Image (tube, rainbow, N blue to C red):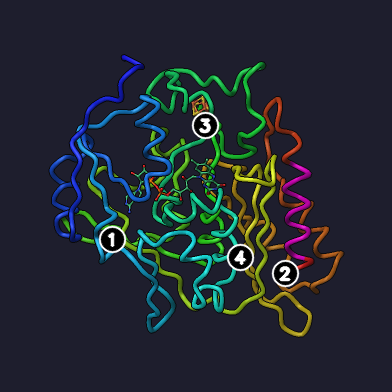
Amino acid sequence: MSKDMMPMFELFQPTDLGGALDLADRFGADGWIMAGGQDSLDWLKDRVKRTQAVIDLSRVPELKGIRETADGVEIGALTTLTEIAESPVISGNFGLLAEAASKVASPQIRHVGTIGGNVSQDARCWYYRSGMDCYRAGGSTCYADTPQGMNREHCLFGADRCVAVSPSDTAPALVALDASMVIRNAGGERVVPAEDFFIGPQIDIENMTVLRPDDILVAIRIPNTWAGANFYFEKVADRKTWDFALVNIAAAIRVTDDTISDLRIAAGGVECVPRRLTVVEDIVKGSAKNGETAKLAGGSASRGATPLNYNHFKIPLLENLVTRAIRDA
Ligand SMILES: Cc1cc2nc3c(=O)[nH]c(=O)nc-3n(C[C@H](O)[C@H](O)[C@H](O)COP(=O)(O)OP(=O)(O)OC[C@H]3O[C@@H](n4cnc5c(N)ncnc54)[C@H](O)[C@@H]3O)c2cc1C
Ligand code: SF4
């Protein structure tokens, strides 16, 4: 492939959802849905992926904004991360998501990057991003999972040929908040729990979500189940400026009389999907909210981890983040 010219594509800018769905249906796998373009444009400019047609959703009003509903909130997929971080509705009831959105990348990226794009972004593995023919790119090897492979950013759990991780900061927050994803295509609508929206390599090694080429993620719904709970979000990255999480943690906790009555907790950067830490949830539910419970919970978070050559450090990192989440939420 020539490296000196970005391959041509047709640009479509539909102004309503019906038009966008028609285009997604017409082009299927030959089209590329684009929201804020912060992930999409990298692929196209780096000449690593190409497409016949870019379907730019930025002019579709039905996909934008935050609406309160009878049982929670609905966030249009094209709502920017800045809008989410600054929304009084989200900060008031679902501060976990506001906090996670505020930790994505840089202010510039958050101003144009959308929540839909954030949860649908592709793997951040160096080898895959540089156009190498690994499993995820349809090939028959993994360059990261080798004795010399650069794998300090890669997974602790759920490896199946590919060892890439979920890079999104908002994804674990949405799993912890029990959100669901509203997906449409020309044939109709389906609503998928956030936990099932993200898929690992054992299900589909080339896609990180259940979205098919003719699908558009139209909105994300968050029920009131966790509204106003105690929340904890923390992201650890190599640098304090824009960077992806090595590990992030998102927890929603209900405390009654100093006892943890209910809890949902998920981590990013440790598996190809945001990992819901059900072992931690089971251990902690019904226990006193104190340092001892937090330490016990932290120790259990890495159960079953199979580190790669260079990412053993993620085990204590995950354990410490879980400990802090339970102690400080
Ligand atoms: C320098 C840099 C740093 C970054 N740091 C972080 C970080 O710290 N944390 C983090 O979480 N992310 C980070 N990102 C990743 C990402 O770019 C942003 O998170 C952003 O939110 C992506 O949103 P977008 O609207 O620009 O997506 P786009 O680039 O438009 O889309 C991303 C993907 O999602 C698909 N898509 C988008 N919207 C829809 C939809 N409604 N329906 C169906 N498919 C859709 C597109 O087809 C594409 O495959 C970073 C990116 C860059 C370039
Ligand atoms: S970790 Fe996944 S994306 Fe990276 S080289 Fe291996 S197969 Fe490819």
Q: Which residues are drawn in magenta?
A: 315-326
* x, y percent for residue 249: 65, 55
135 shown above or below 264 = above
Q: Main secondary structure of the magenta part?
A: helix
Q: Do the CB atoms of the residues marked 3 and 4 lie less than 8 Å apart?
A: no
Report the residue that reaches farthest toward the right.
292
Q: Which residue is mark 4?
A: 264
Q: CA distance from mark 1 to mark 2?
A: 33 Å
Q: Amino acid at mark 4?
A: Arg
Separation (CA) of disc 4 from disc 2: 12 Å
In the rendered image, the quadrant that contains the C terminus is: bottom right
Q: Which residue is mark 3?
A: 160
User: Closest to the observer: 62 or 145?
Assistant: 62
Residue at 42% over, 61% down = 193
Closer mark to the observer between disc 4 and disc 2: 2
Residue 329, disc:
2
Q: Which residue corresponds to the image point at 46% horizontal and 74% vertical from the top-left?
A: 223
